[in-house]
Image: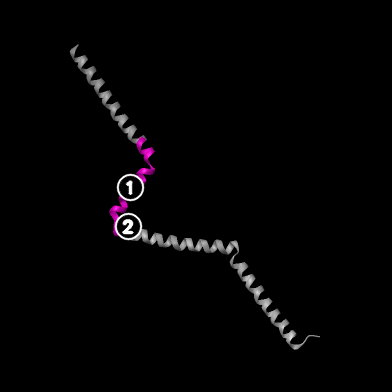
Amino acid sequence: MDTPEIAAARIEVEHTRSRVTATAQELQERLSPKVLAKGAWEGAKEKGAGLAEDAVDAVKARPLAATGVVAAITMFLAREPLMDLAGKVVGSIGEKRKSRSKRTTRQSTTEKA
């Protein structure tokens, strides 16, 4: 048989064990990948919202500068299609000039004959 002190100690050990088990379960839940991912996602959403607000404020403060930056980025990203288009435009202008020049030469040759 246990003495009253030993019985009280056993009861205290059981209470402590229950608290430690509950704490371990809580930690396990907090450190689960699902909870960690959700926390990271929420943090990223908050940070993204803050950045978006800052961007809107910056655009409101300097709309012309923002427009210039957007135009520059767009031109940089679309540089290949723009270069192709410019080449086609310049090429077609050159072809028109050559065609006009040939027509003028033929007309003057015809007029001389």
> Foreground residue, 30 or 95?
30
Q: Name the main secondary structure of what is drawn in magenta.
A: helix
Q: How many marks?
A: 2
Q: Position of residue 113 (x, y in %)?
A: 19, 11
The residue that disc 1 covers is 71
Q: Which image quadrant is residue 106 in?
A: top left
Question: x%, y% of residue 60?
Answer: 31, 59
Disc 2 packing (10 Å; few <14; some 14–19; many ≥20)? some
Q: Which residue is mark 2?
A: 59
Q: Residue at x 29, y 57 (%)?
A: 62
- Looking at the figure, which quarter contains the N terminus? bottom right
Q: Which residues are magenta?
A: 60-83
- SS under mark 2: helix
Magenta-span inclusion, residue 68: yes
Mark 1: which secondary structure?
helix
For residue 64, side relative to residue 39 (left or right): left
Quick one: label 1 or label 2, which is nearer the N terminus? 2
Q: Residue at x 36, y 47 (%)?
A: 73
Q: Indicate the amino acid at tag 2.
A: Val
- Residue drawn at x 62%, y 67% is 28
Residue 33 - label: none
Answer left or right for 49 relative to 5: left
Q: Position of residue 69 (x, y in %)?
A: 33, 50
Task: Give the farthest residue toward the left.
Answer: 112
Q: Position of residue 101 (x, y in %)?
A: 24, 22
16 to the left or right of 112: right
Q: Amino acid at mark 1?
A: Ala
